[in-house]
Amino acid sequence: MKLNEMREKTVDELQSAIVDWKKDLFNYRLQLSTHKLENTALISKTKKLIAQAKTVIKEKEVEHA
């Protein structure tokens, strides 16, 4: 998901996406520890998505405050 797409979503949609990405991140780390993860870049990409979504949520909170 790109940053522009995130800004179009509501806070609730972003929060549910964060939950899904955290589950994915957990699974990627588990696969990494068992040497079954082939694309290790998925971990950093997922962490970046989570951070971007949290930033967009903060931006939306500041706009409404």
Image (cartoon, grey):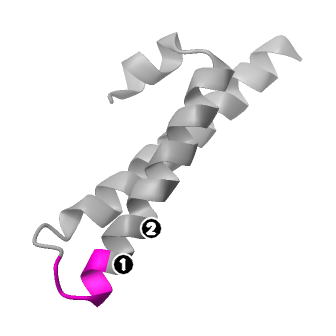
Tell me where residue 41 sits by quadrant.
Answer: bottom left
Q: In which quarter of the image is the C terminus?
A: top right
Q: Where is residue 4 in the image (x, y as percent from the top left)?
A: 39, 18
Residue sitting nearer the eye, 27 or 6:
27
Amino acid type of the residue tagged 1 in the rendering = Leu
Q: How crowded is mark 2: few (under 14 residues within 10 Å), some or many (20 or more)?
A: few
Look at the numbered discs 2 and 1 and tell me whether their residues touch, using CB distance below 8 Å.
Answer: yes
Judged left or right of residue 63, residue 24 is left
Question: Is 1 one of the magenta-colored residues?
Answer: no
Taking 10 as reference, is 3 above or below it? below
Q: What element carries label 1?
A: helix
Q: Can residue 47 be seen in this view?
A: no
Query: Magenta region: which residues?
Result: 31-36
Query: Which residue position is annotated with label 1?
Result: 30
Taking 28 as reference, is 65 above or below it? above
Amino acid type of the residue tagged 2 in the rendering = Phe
Judged left or right of residue 47, residue 2 is left
Residue drawn at point x = 60 percent, y = 38 percent = 55
Residue drawn at point x = 36 percent, y = 78 percent = 30
Q: Residue furthest right?
A: 65
Taking 57 as reference, is 28 above or below it? below
Q: Position of residue 34 (x, y in %)?
A: 25, 88
What separation in Å lies between label 2 and label 1 (alpha carbons)? 6 Å
Residue 26, numbered label: 2
Q: Can residue 25 be seen in this view?
A: yes
Judged left or right of residue 40, residue 11 is right
Residue sitting nearer the eye, 17 or 56:
17
Q: Position of residue 51 (x, y in %)?
A: 52, 49
